[in-house]
Image (cartoon, rainbow, N blue to C red):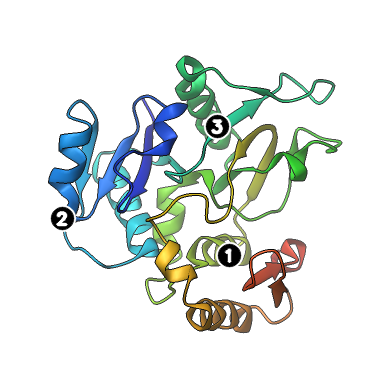
Amino acid sequence: MTAIFTGSLSRPKLPLLKWLPDPTVLVEPQEEQLYRDAHPDLDIRVHPEGGRGFSYLLNEMVRRTLDGGDRYFVFTDDDVHAIRVRPDLRFPFVTCPREDAREVLETLAKKAEQLGLAQYAVSFAAHSWAATAPDTFPTGAWGVHVTDALAVREVGGYDERLAVFGDWEMSARLLSAGRAVARTNLVTFVHKMHSEQGGASAIYEDRERVREAAEMVAGRYPEAARVVEIEAHGLAEVRFNWRKLQP
């Protein structure tokens, strides 16, 4: 059974439990009891160290996957509110029943392995609804995705110096190394920026820190990345032309 990980910080209600009944939840040491009290039946794992950030969280997922003798894992943000699915491109997306969510994600993991993907991304419906093929190559992965833990380790792991955008940077590094990153257009997720307190919300309040991370990532891939200002939430983001990263 493929591990389905989420990380959570100061969100003991775990919004993703509305659609996913049994994730493995990684938490900070100082919040362990908070989460165990709220969810005594969940699989809760504790970071060796606290306060290390999002890329550290992802590296922990990589480590735990490989140490467990597996290769692929699924990551989902803890504030994803739902996933939606469709059997093929002719149909609209419909909300996935809670009891079917694990099977949907495990099926994506199996397909990622069959296709030899380093990452298999799920994205917003707006990115997928008008697609002309079931999968899009190349792309970046964030929010919800299947990841090949061995491929990530081989390119050096997630960069823990980045406060944010470590997920985008990993996709860029994998593509630059000749690995395949694709997006499914048959599964999508529901998520809103700043929808929940906790998590990385405190980081996003520090606009200069976010800009610094965006500029650091864009500076590593000058031919493929640029920093843009997003008026909707007043923050800098890094945007990629993923095709320019392929060798």
- Which residue is label 1 attached to? 177
Distance of mark 2 from mark 3, alpha carbons? Answer: 28 Å
User: Disc 2 or 1, which lies upstream in sequence?
Assistant: 2
Q: Nearer the viewer, mark 1 or mark 3?
A: 3
Element at label 1: loop
Q: Is residue 247 visible?
A: no
Q: Nearer the viewer, residue 30 or 121?
A: 30
List the residue tagged with mark 2: 29
Task: Name which of mark 2 and mark 3 comes first in the sequence.
Answer: 2
Task: Give SS at disc 2.
Answer: helix
Query: What residue type is disc 1 on?
Result: Ala
Q: Is residue 115 above or below residue 234?
A: above
Q: Position of residue 193 (x, y in %)?
A: 57, 55
Q: Residue at x 45, y 24 (%)?
A: 102
**Where does residue 139 sit, x and y in percent of width and height?**
68, 54
Q: Amino acid at mark 2?
A: Pro
Q: Is residue 159 above or below residue 106?
A: below
Q: What amino acid does circle 3 point to? A: Ala
